Each structure stands twice: as structure tokens, then as C-alpha cells.
Image (cartoon, rainbow, N blue to C red):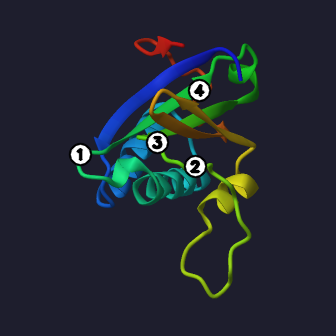
């Protein structure tokens, strides 16, 4: 996706109790920006934030987790009433590579990346310095196609 507008950049401690805080903040930002039907994006934020805290150095003492929320600035977005939103969940790095696995029906976990792979329009990961980002894109509907992007920074 090219041409992005940053909606939010949030850094929280790499602890489990920060996951609902991150989800709530993303919900607030997307709601304020006029998006509706946020269930899938919020589920994926929760899953990726949980993975970051559980499976990366973000979960170590002093670790952090950053959530970046961007939207496309496509010319047709206002006409179509839908915009592609990209969320990056950035952790403090890990030796493992994010890989979806088929969930075991008996297991209480292991569904995070499987959900991302099956619900997101696109997803992937990147590494830079000691950080790793896992991102997803979803097309979201807006309730007000005349939204103003004043105050948002273009990427």
C-alpha cells in the first residue's frame, strides 16, 4: 500500500496488561477517524500485541511494544466509502520468524497468526535493527466519507 496517513503511534510497556490498552486506543483512534465495524481489526491487534509480549524481547523487563495505525490516502477512498487501514505491531525483536500454524483444537493458544492470515486482506513482517514489525491491512468502511485528514502526518 503506497501513500499512507499516520493516524496513531502508541508505545506501551511489553506486559500483558498493555494489550487491552493498545486495543482500546486503536479502537478510539479508528472510531474518531470515522471507521465502523472494527471487530476484526481489534481482534488482530489483540492477537499481534499478545504475540509480541509472549514471543519477543518486548516481554522482557523494560521491553516495549509500539502500535502504528495508518490509512491509505487513495483518491477513490472518499468515493467508495472504504479505506485500507494498516496496523504495524512493533516489538523488541526475537530469534523466531513469525509463522502461522494450524491451531490445535485442544490447545488454548497458537491461533494469533492463523487468525491474521485468514482475516487480513494482506499481512507480513519486517525487521529493522533490533525491532520486528508484524503488520496487517484491512479494508474498513467509514460512516462519514467526508472526513478531514487535518492534523494527520503523511508517511
Q: Is residue 54 above or below residue 130?
A: below
Residue that label 2 marks: 41
Residue at x-position 65% and y-position 14%: 3
Classify mark 3: residues with Cα within 10 Å, few (<14), some (14-19) or many (20+): many
Give the spatial CA distance, label 2 vs label 1.
27 Å
Residue that label 3 marks: 93
Q: Is residue 110 above or below residue 13?
A: below
Classify mark 1: residues with Cα within 10 Å, few (<14), some (14-19) or many (20+): few
Q: Secondary structure at mark 4?
A: strand
Q: Secondary structure at mark 1?
A: loop
Looking at the picture, how far across and down is residue 87, in whole percent? 55, 37
Residue that label 4 marks: 71
Residue at x-position 44% and y-position 12%: 150
> Tag 3 or tag 2, which sits nearer the N-term?
2
Which of labels 4 and 1 is toward the front?
1
Give the spatial CA distance, label 4 vs label 3.
25 Å
> Tag 3 or tag 1, which sits nearer the N-term?
1
Looking at the picture, how far across and down is residue 140, in whole percent? 65, 39
Q: Report the quarter where the N terminus lies.
A: top right
Q: Is residue 2 left or right of residue 150?
A: right
User: Along the line of sight, which residue is nearer the eye, 41 or 37?
Assistant: 41
Give the spatial CA distance, label 2 vs label 4.
13 Å
User: Along the line of sight, which residue is nearer the eye, 42 or 146?
Assistant: 42
Which of labels 4 and 3 is toward the front?
3
Residue at x-position 43% and y-position 60%: 54
Which of labels 2 and 3 is toward the front?
3
Which of labels 2 and 1 is toward the front?
1
User: Along the line of sight, which residue is nearer the eye, 110 or 137?
Assistant: 110
Q: Secondary structure at mark 2?
A: helix
Using the image, tell me which numbered label, if any, was put on residue 62.
1
User: Along the line of sight, which residue is nearer the eye, 74 or 141?
Assistant: 74
Residue at x-position 44% and y-position 33%: 130
Amino acid at each position: 500500500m503506497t501513500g499512507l496517513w499516520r493516524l496513531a503511534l502508541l508505545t506501551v510497556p511489553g506486559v500483558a496488561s498493555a494489550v487491552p490498552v493498545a486495543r482500546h486506543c486503536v479502537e478510539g483512534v479508528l472510531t474518531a477517524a470515522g471507521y465502523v465495524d472494527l471487530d476484526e481489526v481489534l481482534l488482530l491487534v489483540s492477537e499481534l500485541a499478545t504475540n509480541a509480549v509472549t514471543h519477543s524481547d518486548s516481554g522482557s523487563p523494560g521491553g516495549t511494544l509500539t502500535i502504528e495505525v495508518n490509512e491509505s490516502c487513495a483518491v477513490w477512498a472518499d468515493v467508495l466509502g472504504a479505506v485500507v487501514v494498516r496496523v504495524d505491531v512493533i516489538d523488541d525483536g526475537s530469534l523466531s520468524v513469525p509463522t502461522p500454524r494450524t491451531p490445535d483444537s485442544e490447545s488454548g493458544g497458537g491461533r494469533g497468526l492463523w487468525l491474521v492470515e485468514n482475516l487480513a486482506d494482506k499481512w507480513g513482517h519486517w525487521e529493522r535493527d533490533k525491532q520486528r514489525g508484524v503488520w496487517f491491512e484491512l479494508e474498513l468502511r467509514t460512516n462519514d466519507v467526508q472526513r478531514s485528514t487535518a492534523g494527520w502526518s503523511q508517511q
